[in-house]
Image: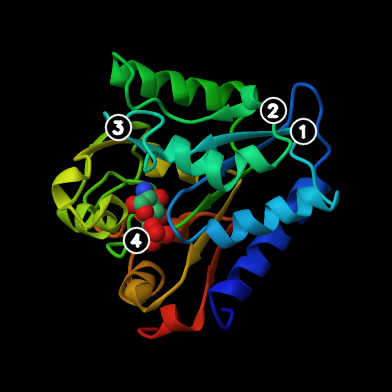
Amino acid sequence: IRDDADTVADYVAEYIKARILQFAPTARRPFVIGLPTGSSPIGVYKRLVAFCADGSLSFKHVVSFNMDEYVGLPRDHPESYHSFMWHHLFKHIDIQPENVNILDGNAPDLQAECEKYEAKIQSYGGIELFLGGIGPDGHIAFNEPGSSLSSRTRVKTLAYETILANARFFGGDVAKVPMLALTVGVGTVMDAREVVVIITGASKANALAKCIEEGVNHMWTVSAIQTHSRSLVVCDDDATLEL
Ligand code: GLP
């Protein structure tokens, strides 16, 4: 628990930096990181960019897999997760573009796209560290309430609460928010050797309480981290209101 979103971002950015620096990459085994979108990780990305700028961190041997992407939104749409990731992180760091993996929400065969993504993660020997945020309904990635806790990458219909929560990015217009997304599954996230989740703000307080103080439950999908042997929740004071 940290005081506020800024100190949460400080902690998580330092943590990720240390994990990348500790890791001894080889040509066949780079550091594989899973990354989220949303407002929660923006402060972390800012700090990682600053570390790269001052030379204390490099992403040369890092391969990334993003959690999710909207279906049917053009890749260059300002609210696509492709745009988000390049804008907030990738274009400012030395990651090799071919090492960036983001689901293609415009693939002609969405199911095949999801299977290919899972296979590619496996081809690197899995994900070392999966960073995540959560929705106010306790979803991780786009694993909405009711998702199987062993789910894999797939097409998902967004819950109305999520569409409402994300309408702020689409000029407040609920009708403009895509109704479908591609998302890694809860099982995909839990397969990572380590899971780090950022939870900040009073709007997430109920979800934090459900996820860590109640039972593991597919209606609050991030609660699956209770079963992970190496998981870390980094939250601010406001998010702890219901604990
Ligand atoms: C979307 C993303 C999630 C993210 C959530 C929370 O639903 N698919 O991965 O955790 O937004 O976003 P924010 O951090 O803006 O609250």
226 sits to left or right of 93? left
Q: Quadrant of residue 188?
A: top left
Kindly identify which residue carries mark 3: 73
- As helix, strand or loop, the secondary structure at mark 2 comes to loop
- Residue 120 on image: x %, y %: 53, 21
Using the image as rendered, state which of residue 93 and residue 146 is in the foreground. Answer: 93
- Distance Cα–Cα, label 4 vs label 2: 38 Å
Q: Amino acid at mark 1?
A: Lys
158 sits to left or right of 27? left
Kindly identify which residue carries mark 4: 216
- Residue 57 on image: x %, y %: 80, 48
Q: Identify the mark nearer the N-term, 3 or 4.
A: 3
Residue depicted at x 35% and y 84%: 242
Residue 96: which numbered mark, if any? 2
- Residue 164 on image: x %, y %: 20, 58
Kindly identify which residue carries mark 1: 60
